[in-house]
Every structure is written in structure tokens, then in C-alpha cells.
Image (cartoon, rainbow, N blue to C red):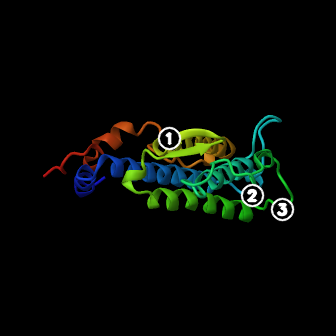
Amino acid sequence: MTPDQAKARSSSSPARAILDDAQNVFRTYKRLADRALEQVDDASFVRTIDDESNSLALIVKHISGNLRSRWTDFLTSDGEKPARRRDQEFEQRDADSRASLMKAWEDGWQHVFDSIGSLREDEILAIVTIRGEPHTVVQAINRSLAHTASHVGQIIFLAKHLQSSAWQTLSIPRGKSDEYLARPAAAGKPAPK
């Protein structure tokens, strides 16, 4: 974050800061998952590592269905839509091509970004329902973010496992922390003169 971004954030209301941060954190997790998924080929995309595991394809399918359900008509309808078939999100179907699943993935995430982006500051404590249970908007955001982040972690772990030595790290490479922290921009320090 640049100093100007930090200043702009600090001058906004607490509600706006919460909404903006939620939007940014969701974008960060999407970016991490996208970068992990880009590293695997189509065979690895549908591969499972054991009988109880989900493939990357099924995790993508589940997140897509969950986000679409939770974030469609976010303020006005229950987050568990009647048309959603959650159990089918964990079944690989012939029609589930990588392209179709990635299209659904983009659609699910777009629902998140559009919904959070349209929320007004005075709606942050509004009550929404998920499976008939009341949540404030903040609670619903946090619930969705925690759920999504856990599955993004699965995507990263599985993609890294499947790629093995070909994996390209998504963060600071092993053994490079000191080097990273010594960089002025990374440590938030002014550049040496």
C-alpha cells in the first residue's frame, strides 16, 4: 500500500474501511488461487490424490457455487439459494470442462466484487440470512471470506503438490526472507541514499 492509499483509507469511515478491506482481501485470495491454478495442466486440474480428496476442478466448482449463492441478491435473499445443489458441486460431470468451470469461477467472484462494491456504509450492520440464520453484513462477509480462504489454501496446497519441483512460489521463496526484508520497499523503509 502506498502512503497515499494509506492516507485515503485512514480518512474514510470505519464502515467504508471494512468494506474496502473486505474487497481487497477477496481480490488477494482470488489472485493467489488464479496464480496457483495457472500452474497446473488439464490432467492435474481434475486429478485427486486419494479417494477422499477433491480435485482442483471440484474445489473451483464448489467455490463458484458458494459465492454465486451467497452473493446474488445479497441483501434481499437468503445466501443459500433454493436452486443451489451443493452436493453436485463435489461431483465431476462430463459437462464440467476446465473452461466451463473457470467461467463459473469468474462469475462467482464477480458476484462478490459487485455486491461488496455496491454496499453503502449504512448497510454494514444490516441483517442478512444464510440458511435461515441471521448475520450482520460484516458477519456474512467474514463468514464468506473465511470459507473461501480455506478453500484457496486447499487449491494452493494441491497445486503445489501436483507441480512438485516445477512449482513457482506465490510469495517469498524459501531461504529468501532476509533478502526480501532487506529491500527498502518491502520493509516500508525509505530507499538508501
- As drawn, which residue projects farthest toward the left? 193
**Spot occupied by residue 151 in the image (x, y as percentages of width and height):** 62, 42
Query: Hey, what amino acid is under mark 1?
Result: Asn
Residue 37 picture quarter:
bottom right
**Could you tell me how far apart the alpha carbons at marks 3 and 2 are, in whole angstroms?**
14 Å
- Foreground mark, 2 or 1, reads 1
User: Badge 3, how many Cα within 10 Å: few under 14, some, many 20+?
Assistant: few
Whether tag 2 and tag 1 are in contact, CB under 8 A, the answer is no
Along the line of sight, the residue nearer the viewer: 174 or 92: 92
**Spot occupied by residue 65 in the image (x, y as percentages of width and height):** 69, 53
Query: Hey, what amino acid is under mark 3?
Result: Ala
**Spot occupied by residue 149 in the image (x, y as percentages of width and height):** 55, 42
- The residue that mark 2 highlights is 42
Q: Earlier in the sequence, mark 3 or mark 2?
A: 2
- The residue that mark 1 highlights is 142
User: Viewed as shown, does residue 18 lie left or right of 42?
Assistant: left
- The residue that mark 3 highlights is 95
Q: Secondary structure at mark 1?
A: helix
Q: Earlier in the sequence, mark 3 or mark 1?
A: 3
- Residue at the location (73% across, 64% down)? 100
User: Viewed as shown, does residue 179 lie left or right of 163?
Assistant: left
Tell me, yes or no, if residue 158 can be seen here: yes
- Residue at the location (77% across, 54% down)? 43
Whether tag 3 and tag 2 are in contact, CB under 8 A, the answer is no
User: Badge 1, how many Cα within 10 Å: few under 14, some, many 20+?
Assistant: few
**Could you tell me how far apart the alpha carbons at marks 2 and 1 are, in whole angstroms?**
32 Å
Q: Looking at the image, is 134 positioned above or below residue 29? A: above
User: Viewed as shown, does residue 19 lie left or right of 101?
Assistant: left
**Could you tell me how far apart the alpha carbons at marks 3 and 1 are, in whole angstroms?**
32 Å
Tell me, yes or no, if residue 148 can be seen here: no
Query: Hey, what amino acid is under mark 2?
Result: Asp
